Amino acid sequence: MPIPLPSLSDISTAITLLVIPVAAWGAALWFGLIIWTFKDVRARSRDPFAQILAAFMVGVLTAPGWLIYLMLRPRETLAEAYERALEEEALLQEIEEKAACPGCSRPIQDDWKICPHCHTRLRKDCPDCGRLLELQWNLCPYCGSGPGGGVSMPTVESELPPDRQDAGPSPAVDRPEPSPGDDSAPTPDPSL
Ligand SMILES: [Zn+2]
Ligand SMILES: [Zn+2]
């Protein structure tokens, strides 16, 4: 008994059944590639033209287009570029903030009095409280001591208006106010 040959319609049905899943899978992959590319390029570039171009290239050229995109895309994402810029800025600031000796330009510590390399005087002691002061300061910010060692802070009384000063216990109160018609104003003593 001879095996009956499959009819033409049977073959076409089988091909159709085989092609449909493959085509659907291919279409899903193609669509996924486009979406992935669009998301990826948006994370790497703000240029809308580049975003559309990348997605369009993958859509038209499919897998080869995707490979070309992978070769041409920006190396780092925008977030990575931002992070790197921040790091660079912090590094730069650190270098700038590092104090240097005015004599030999070598790095110095904040609490050094004299440069150990070139013996340049860097800071001085406060005569009153002993804390380190910059050479150009003539007033200690810690204890208020002036150049002579005494406290040279302005007193509260001198900042008050004159009428308030008279009311206060300052020595100025004891001095009588000279009246307009008073002839007892200080005059040079003829005997001197
Ligand atoms: Zn030095
Ligand atoms: Zn001081």
Image (cartoon, rainbow, N blue to C red):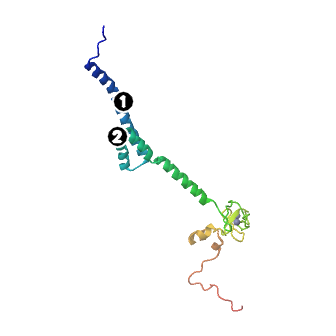
N-term mark: 2 or 1: 1
> Disc 1 on helix, strand or loop?
helix
Query: What amino acid is labelled 2 in the image?
Result: Gly
Q: Are marks 2 and 1 in contact (CB under 8 Å)?
A: no
Q: Is residue 12 left or right of residue 167?
A: left
Residue 118 tag number? none
Nearest to the observer: residue 162 or residue 69: 69
Q: CA distance from mark 2 to mark 1?
A: 15 Å
Residue 59 tag number? 2
Q: Tell me what residue is drawn at x 64 percent, y 85 percent.
A: 186
> Disc 2 on helix, strand or loop?
helix
Nearest to the observer: residue 73 or residue 137: 73
Nearest to the observer: residue 64 or residue 150: 64
Mark 2 CB within 8 Å of ligand 1 = no
Q: Tell me what residue is drawn at x 57 percent, y 57 percent.
A: 92
Q: Is residue 88 left or right of residue 34?
A: right
Q: Tell me what residue is drawn at x 51 percent, y 49 percent.
A: 83
Percent of width and height locating residue 54: 38, 45
Percent of width and height locating residue 70: 44, 43
Percent of width and height locating residue 94: 60, 56
Q: Is residue 122 left or right of residue 65?
A: right
Q: Is residue 186 left or right of residue 62?
A: right
Q: Quadrant of residue 129?
A: bottom right
Nearest to the observer: residue 102 or residue 164: 102
Q: Residues within 10 Å of mark 1 (few under 14, many from 20)?
A: few
Q: Quadrant of residue 14?
A: top left
Residue 25 tag number? 1
Percent of width and height locating residue 86: 52, 52
Q: Quadrant of residue 144?
A: bottom right
Q: Is residue 122 visible?
A: no
